[in-house]
Amino acid sequence: MTFTWFILLLTIAGTVFLLVLFHHRFLGHVLHERIPDRPRRRLFVASLSFFLTFAGVRGVVYCIEHQIPPFHFIEVGGRHIHHLVIGIVILLVVGYGWLAEVGTGADNSSILVSRLMSILYGAGAALTLDEFALWLNLRDVYWSREGRASIDAIILFGAVLAAGAWGAPLFQRGQTRNLKKK
């Protein structure tokens, strides 16, 4: 049960860190300047959250496998609960929120809520796809050769998120500035 709380704490801490980093700070200003439309900003924040969560979870699982305290697998009633379950729950909550148009920008919802939903989406997707090989093979193949399917899924989905956000909008201002100097 310790691992459950640690994963939740890690997700919450990462969420708070990213929210503070982007809210009323220099990076928040840069984000608004370089990516003016809200959907692309949500993609950017989700992709950042996705990659950071993936790296953090892989690190935690490595520590568990090598018996580095205080990390342990989630055990409830003798049953191992994989972190993809937490990811699925987060994705369901965010999906419901977006169906109810919470944080989508369709109304006057706050930018903070929009970023929170994006961060949670990225974290939930990473927790779920990190165990893609488990749901593909219906057995725990996390560190085995078959477990490579999870890495492939992470790379593929991460590339889609990153391409949607980090593509041309991030570099447009720099190109415009260079054109004006000529």
Image: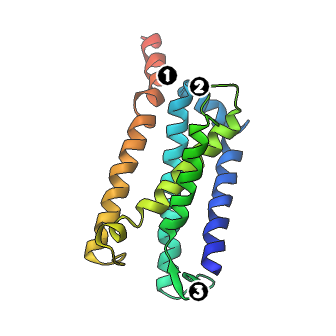
First in residue order: circle 2 vs circle 3: 2
User: Can you give x and y, in whole percent of width and height, for residue 145 in the image?
Assistant: 26, 75
First in residue order: circle 2 vs circle 1: 2
Q: Gap in Å between the C-alphas at discs 2 and 3?
A: 51 Å
Secondary structure of the residue carrying tag 1 is: helix
Q: Are marks 1 and 3 in contact (CB under 8 Å)?
A: no
User: Can you give x and y, in whole percent of width and height, for residue 164 in the image?
Assistant: 41, 35
Label 2, residues with CA under 10 Å away: few <14, some 14-19, many ≥20: few
Question: Residue at left 56%, top 86%?
Answer: 68
Q: Amino acid under label 3?
A: Gly
Looking at the image, residue 11 sits to the left or right of residue 163; the answer is right
Question: Residue at left 59%, top 86%?
Answer: 77
Closer to the camera in the image, 120 or 95? 95
Label 1, residues with CA under 10 Å away: few <14, some 14-19, many ≥20: some
Q: Nearer the viewer, mark 2 or mark 1?
A: 2
Question: Residue at left 63%, top 83%?
Answer: 70
Q: Amino acid under label 1?
A: Arg
Q: Which residue is mark 2?
A: 33
Is 70 located above or below residue 54 in the figure? below
User: Label for residue 173?
Assistant: 1
Question: Residue at left 65%, top 80%?
Answer: 2
Q: Nearer the viewer, mark 1 or mark 3?
A: 3
Q: Nearer the viewer, mark 2 or mark 3?
A: 3
Q: Amino acid under label 2?
A: Glu
First in residue order: circle 1 vs circle 3: 3
Closer to the camera in the image, 165 or 7? 7
Q: Which residue is mark 3?
A: 77
Q: Are marks 2 and 1 in contact (CB under 8 Å)?
A: yes
